[in-house]
Image (spheres, rainbow, N blue to C red):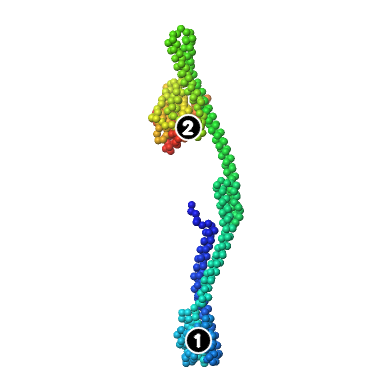
Amino acid sequence: MNRAPFGLRAQIVIALFVVLAIAATLAMAAMQPLTAASGRLTRKRLGLTLARSVAGEVALTPSLEGVRALLQQSVGDVGLSGAALYDLSHRRVALAGELTMPTSLRPPALMDDARESDDVLAVVVFLPGRGVFVAETSLAPSPAERAVPMLILLYTASAGVLALVVVYLLLTRWIVRPVESLTLAAERVAAGRRDVRAEVRGAAEIARAAGAFNRMTEQLSARESDLSDRVEELERAHRELKRAQEQIVRGERLATVGRLSAGIAHEVGNPLAAIVGLADVMADGGLDESEVREFSGRIGREAQRIHRTVRELLDYARASPSPAGATEPGITAQGDVADAMEQVVRLIAPQKSLRDVRVELDVSGTLPPVGVSTDRLVQVLLNLALNAADALHMAALTPGSITLRARHEMGRVSIEVEDDGPGIPDEARAKVFEPFYTTKPAGEGTGLGLATSAAIVEQAGGLIAATSRNDGARGARIAIELPVAGQRLPRESIVP
């Protein structure tokens, strides 16, 4: 920002000084020749008048001594510079002062004349019966006349300085101080103060500006108060929305738990039946020590099988309810994609209804942690896998297969869930992630599984999309992109 080196008062005073200096210079340039010409003309007229007046007195003075005395009296600093009387034979009979011009030294006969040469005026007056009177007077300006321009300049400068002082004081009172007060009030408002009011004073325009500033400050304070209330309402609504979303995610998780719980009854029932049978045999007795050890080991293995199945289901049900999977505020969630895929396979494996669906894993290399917790990844992939299995059963395409594929490329982890089912119709691809949209018969499914999965992925800064399979085979493909933990998803997206 360019700032002037001087304040408003200094700038106006400097501008006025420059204007006065230019005006004085132009006035002096125009006045000096006019004054010189006017003074010369005045001195010429005075010289003519004085010379002719003296000539008249000479004509009236009869004696030559009287003429000489008169000429002496007329010559001096305030009179003629020289005067002489010539008789009719051109002989000079009286002289006072000094004559320098040829016209004065040899005056014409029987005629009047007046001639200028430099700064000398020569006047010749013919006196009938007496001779010729000659007088010279100086046209050069006197010291007093030469001092007039300097006096005028001094007066102009004094008047200009006085005007500048008056302007400076008036500017200070009417403009500068009110502007400084308004500027200080604006700086305080910019610093966050809203109770500041500018003093309404000074010139009319500045007073109006101060009034407008005060009205603006009042409106700004009112709008900030209203904005603060709205922000508080939005924050409250956001918290309520997050709680509602958590309830939806939790409810969908519990719905999945219920579905899985019904499916593992057979997986738990068989080990329990074996445990009961072995316990009955041991209770009947008649077993040697080696058989007791064998039966005890089989009972332990079957119990561990039940424990493992129930524990995996409970671990899934007790997963963290936070949106991104972070356990504490300010801690970025991290998840293991490969581990999540393995947990999904273990949760699906006990399901009797899914025995005819083959679940395969295809993990390329070592995957970095992603920005969403492992339990949330399990929920997303489990929803996608169960939806794929339902699609296979609804289309009677069992036995079928579901492939969970993951790879790391270009700063992202790409996950694909593919099946060889009927696929997703083109008109349904844009709707499958909408809440309560489902292609299942009424009463089957909540229509929130894919919507919840999409919300989890998007909250983690990822992308999700439903497409056809890349290999041209029949079936559906859900593609997910997740950012590496602590990073953002690169701008170039490979999700169609």
Q: Position of residue 96 (x, y in %)?
A: 50, 86
Residue 489, labelled with which disc?
A: none
For residue 212, above or below residue 250: below
Q: Nearer the observer, disc 2 or disc 1?
A: 1
Residue 96, labelled with which disc?
A: 1
The amino acid type of the residue labelled 2 equals Ala
Few, some or many C-alpha atoms within 10 Å of disc 1 (few <14, some 14-19, many ≥20)? many
The amino acid type of the residue labelled 1 equals Ala
- The mark that comes first in sequence, 2 or 1, is 1
How far apart are labels 2 and 1 at the CA level?
Answer: 124 Å
For residue 405, above or below residue 26: above
Q: Quadrant of residue 162?
A: bottom right
CB within 8 Å, label 2 to label 1? no
Q: Secondary structure at mark 1?
A: strand
Q: Residue at x 47, y 21 (%)?
A: 308
Looking at the rendered image, the quarter that the C terminus falls into is top left
Q: Nearer the viewer, residue 412 or 389?
A: 412
Q: Residue at x 58, y 55 (%)?
A: 178
For residue 372, above or below residue 169: above
Residue 333, labelled with which disc?
A: 2
Q: Position of residue 84 (x, y in %)?
A: 49, 87
Q: Position of residue 68 (x, y in %)?
A: 52, 89
Q: Residue at x 52, y 71 (%)?
A: 150
